[in-house]
Image: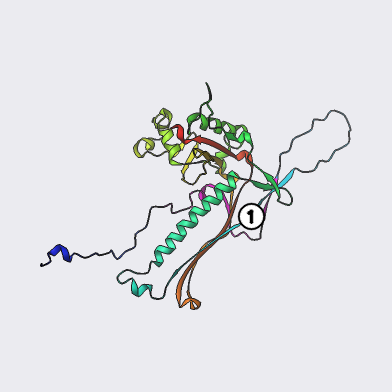
Amino acid sequence: MAMTIPDQYQVKYTNKWGTLLQQTIARFRNYTSTDTGLSGKVVFMDQFGLLDFDEKTSRLGKTVLDEAPTDCRSMRPRIFTKAIGYDEFDGTQLGNIDVPVSKTIEGLRAAAGRRMDDVMISGFLGTNYIGEDGMKAVELPSDQIVAANYVETGSAKASNLTIDKLRVALQRFQEEEAWGQDSENYGDQLVIAVTSSQIMSLLRTTEATSADFVNVKALVNGEIDTLLGFKFIRTQRLPLDEDGKTRSCLAWVKSKAKFGLWEDFKVKLSVRDDMEEALQIRAKFACGATRLQEEGFVKILCDESAN
């Protein structure tokens, strides 16, 4: 039986490498106080505390000297590496498509950005260390956490991100003198990290979608850029509680969030003579993060099942 034209159809491939959907940069880095070129196994950040006056109640009394209120924070690096290899004959065997060197470097850079965000999330939400030896553990205090069932009025009820929760977070920043009055005049910034679930929750509220409250960008693009002074950063990397439905979102004041780079992202290409001249693409970076002051952070618990 003679073959028809469809029997001769061939499978062909493109001569370019595509990429999969992914977060390609470190989204938090520009919203922190960042130090570069750090060295050593631990970096200490000295801090001067609050002073107050004593009222004079007698004449010609003795002068009393007090110690200056000082403390320090410590930050340690976390080191990350990744190496990708290509055989010496991969270029020949691939035919019309090149060895994806540039795509590999792009992918490594994107992966580094995501890991840097993870380090910042962990450092800002988790245990920090203070004291002269940098070993005294400190957690985010309970009064800096907004409960998942917080409401301004009425019976407590679990909810996703609400205007009520944003307002109480803003109030806590103001009460601690972390934000408001002169803060913005010194280049500081109020930031909140949320997932798409929290943005969608806010877009269901009148305050977040009315042109009387926010920029109409929220109506046109389905995005919330700034609301109640908070600069919104969307990320899908914020942790869920063990129940699998309560997300830990985080608001902070930029000047109180420290991100440190011992070594920024670097990539090196080399030929491995010990592996039959394989091409090695190796990337590395080292970074750390810490809160500079707990009062500069508020964790907001959001029940994503309550949408």
Q: Is residue 218 above or below residue 95?
A: above
Q: Secondary structure at mark 1?
A: loop
- The picture places residue 265, in percent across and down from the top left corner, at 51, 61
Closer to us: 238 or 74: 238
Residue 90 appears in the picture as rendered: yes
Residue closest to the far top: 154
Residue at (50% x, 40% y) in the render: 244
Q: Which residues are magenta?
A: 22-47
Closer to us: 29 or 1: 1
Q: Is residue 189 above or below residue 171?
A: below
- The picture places residue 215, in percent across and down from the top left corner, at 40, 35
| Left or right position of 123 against 59 | left
Which residue was labeled with disc 1? 76
Task: Quadrant for residue 251, please give it.
Answer: top right
Task: Quadrant for residue 40, please give it.
Answer: bottom right
- The picture places residue 211, in percent across and down from the top left corner, at 38, 31
